[in-house]
Amino acid sequence: MDVRKQVLQIIADQAMLDVADVSMESTPEDLGIDSLGLVEAIFSIEEQFDISVPFNANDPTESDFDISSVAKIVEGIEKLIAEQTS
């Protein structure tokens, strides 16, 4: 399973939605994911990929990690994985 599919599944699980209902353009707000849900999704992503996401749960807007859409989250995770393996 590729990164995109795994992230979509984690986000769908967190939003309690079918993965088919989550698009790359979806925002956490679109999916009904609140700040606590977002933190839980980030923790799940970190665990799944064995990475550390630079995400400030107390002030998500101040983080270097873009959480504005599913596509941006996937892009950020792919970048972190690439940095870790290089």
Image: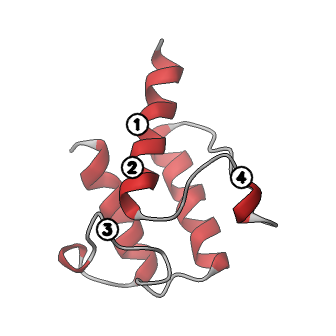
Mark 3 or mark 1: which is in front? 3
Q: Are marks 1 and 4 in contact (CB under 8 Å)?
A: no
Residue linked to disc 2: 74
Using the image, determine if residue 17 lies above or below residue 13.
Answer: below
Residue linked to disc 1: 78
Q: Amino acid at mark 2?
A: Val
Q: Which mark is residue 25?
A: 3
Q: Earlier in the sequence, mark 1 or mark 4?
A: 4
Q: In the displayed structure, does residue 8 sit left or right of residue 78?
A: left
Which type of secondary structure does the marked residue at label 1 adopt? helix
Q: In the displayed structure, does residue 60 sit left or right of residue 44?
A: right
Mark 1 or mark 4: which is in front? 4
Q: Which mark is residue 63?
A: 4
Instruction: Give how far across and how far down residue 83 sits, in percent.
Output: 51, 22
Q: Badge 2, how many Cα within 10 Å: few under 14, some, many 20+?
A: many
Q: Amino acid at mark 4?
A: Ser
Q: Residue at x 25, y 54 (%)?
A: 5
